[in-house]
Image: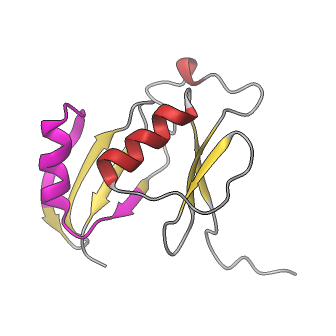
């Protein structure tokens, strides 16, 4: 039997790929990978590539309740979670849980423009 070695690619289905990509570039500092498939923007994140893409047929993001991706925990690493939190707060981004210190360093969760809950932590 084949063995799965772990996550290898993460993509969020979004309403507007250009707007979502701009959000992640402007507010999180992500940089685009050299190539992306049609209908998607792939970022040069490590160790796992992260992307935003057009929804697959039959996916209705407006019908997702309470928000898209409910039940999935998406965590991204930052070098300074508090500084990123302060930037996002200043930009009017919805903070779902305030910063706290825990086993993964400083962590907080925000809602991206499509409503996905994204947790940031700063301990590698």
Q: Position of residue 116 (x, y in %)?
A: 43, 38
Q: Residue at x 19, y 61 (%)?
A: 81
Vertical position of residue 59 compared to residue 38: above or below? above
Q: What residue occupies the far top of the structure in this picture?
A: 63
In this picture, residue 89 sits left or right of residue 19: left
Specify whether 1 is left or right of 23: right
x 49%, y 66%: residue: 45
Residue 97's spot in the image, x, y percent? 20, 43
Q: Is residue 11 visible?
A: yes
Q: Position of residue 110 (x, y in %)?
A: 28, 42
* Image quadrant in which the N terminus is located: bottom right
Q: Is residue 91 magenta?
A: yes
Residue 70 visible in image = no
Q: Which residues are magenta?
A: 75-100
Identify the residue at the far front of this view: 34
- The coloring applied to the image is secondary structure
Which quadrant does the C terminus fall into?
Answer: bottom left
Q: Relative to the observer, which residue lies in front, 48 or 75?
A: 48
Q: Residue at x 47, y 37 (%)?
A: 20
Q: Viewed as shown, does residue 88 lie left or right of 113?
A: left
Toward which corner of the image does residue 75 lie, by quadrant? Answer: bottom left
Q: Looking at the image, how many numbered discs can be counted on the residues?
A: 0
| Above/below status of 122 relative to 111 | below
Image quadrant assignment for residue 76? bottom left
Q: Where on the picture, by quarter, is residue 13?
A: top right
Q: Is residue 87 magenta?
A: yes
Nearer the observer, 40 or 55: 40
Q: Is residue 95 left or right of residue 70?
A: left
Farthest-out residue, right: 1
Closer-to-camera residue (76/5): 76
């Amino acid at each position: 039997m084949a063995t799965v070695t772990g996550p290898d690619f993460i993509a969020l289905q979004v309403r507007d790929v250009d707007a979502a990509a701009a959000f992640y570039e402007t507010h999180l500092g992500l940089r685009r990978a050299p190539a992306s498939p049609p209908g998607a923007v792939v970022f040069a994140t490590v160790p796992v590539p992260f992307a935003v893409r057009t929804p697959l047929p039959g996916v209705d993001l407006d019908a997702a309740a309470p928000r898209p991706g409910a039940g999935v925990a998406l965590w991204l690493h930052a070098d300074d979670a508090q500084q990123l939190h302060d930037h996002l707060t200043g930009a009017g981004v919805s903070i779902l849980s305030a910063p706290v210190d825990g086993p993964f360093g400083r962590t907080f969760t925000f809602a991206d423009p499509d409503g996905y809950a994204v947790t940031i932590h700063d301990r590698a």
